[in-house]
Amino acid sequence: KLREAWDFPRVTQQVGSHTGLEPWQQELPARVNLSAAPAAPPALHAKVDAAEEQLLAKVLALEKERAALSHSSHRQRQEVEKELETLLDRVAELEHGSSAYSPPDAFKISIPIRNNYMYARVRKALPELYAFTACMWLRSRAGSPGQGTPFSYSVPGQANEIVLLEAGPDPMELLVNDKVAQLPLSLKDNGWHHICISWTTRDGLWSAYQDGELRGSGENLAAWHPIKPHGILILGQEQDTLGGRFDATQAFVGDIAQFNLWDHTLTPAQVLGMANCTGPLRGNIVPWEDRLVETFGGATKAALEVCQGKAKA
């Protein structure tokens, strides 16, 4: 439940009994500890205060709306809950000081050595998909043949629901429902490259882009197979079972940034805009956000604005 997920301290019933306020009015101010914010320049502090006041006013309005929706449709309630959660996340960011103003996508995942224990997990459940586009910036550091696995998506009963993999001397491959298409992509120069893979269940059509250019396309890749929901999305390792049993020979070594996932195929112009850093887009299924990406085994996060200095006129 939403209230159980809040990290703010609760207000006791004893306080509420003397205030005459509604429960949501009693609880909300106690959750926002403005005194915890670090010292900041007066101008920035004033802006933060003003932003907090606006956000809290919106939170109070949404709380009232949520209470009034007790007999409304489930969908309406979900929409209000989602907006309320987003606003409360923003309040929490403001409380942690000006560092919270860093863009949510200004980081990379680094895996320095080939192993079977360093990886990142995306903390987002995927719905059933009839098409997808996955885009990311990659910088491979592999010192041996094969770039490994930039990402893999596994579901119960199918470890290879979606996998991007280059094993040994073989070409890079896209696996969908354990069916394979070879991709004419190359990351062997140890530089940053923008990669996009798109697929649709209709005729199993797929396309592969590198640095904004279409490098290959085909059909009959798991045609008419819907991508199953509620799986596990891993960056840097190939899953032989749901969420685990990694193989070091298939591990990615290097840096991953801006992994975004959409539930439709992007246009060539959209892909080119992202690669040129002139048209950034956020995945509508999985956006690249710090709070959604958790690292394990020694994989690290580091600040990175991948498009800094790369934008083309």
Image (cartoon, grey):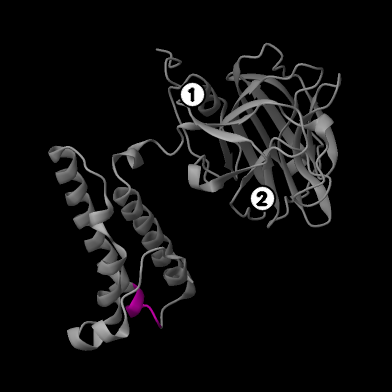
Could you tell me residue 247's position as x and y percent? 83, 37
* Residue at image location 18% in from the left, 83% down from the top: 19
The circle drawn on residue 175 is: none
Judge left or right: residue 49 versus residue 14.
left
67 falls in the magenta region: yes
Q: Amino acid at mark 2?
A: Leu
Q: Residues within 10 Å of mark 1 (few under 14, many from 20)?
A: some
Is residue 236 visible in the rendered image? The answer is: yes
Query: Is residue 304 depicted above or below 93 in this figure?
Result: above
Q: Nearer the viewer, residue 49 or 137?
A: 49
Q: Nearer the viewer, residue 60 or 207?
A: 60
* In this view, the mark in front (1 or 2): 1
Query: Is residue 58 depicted above or below 219 in this figure?
Result: below
Q: Main secondary structure of the magenta part?
A: helix
Part of the protein shown in magenta:
66-70
- Determine the CA span between mark 1 and mark 2: 28 Å
Q: Amino acid at mark 1?
A: Val
Mark 1 and mark 2 lie on one chain; the one further toward the N terminus is 2
* Residue at image location 22% in from the left, 50% down from the top: 51
Could you tell me residue 269's position as x and y percent? 52, 25
Placement of the C terminus among the 4 image quadrants: top left
Name which quarter of the figure residue 70 lies in. bottom left
Residue topped by disc 1: 306
Residue topped by disc 2: 129
Determine the secondary structure under disc 2. loop
Judge left or right: residue 3 versus residue 131.
left
Determine the secondary structure under disc 1. loop
Judge left or right: residue 144 versus residue 54.
right
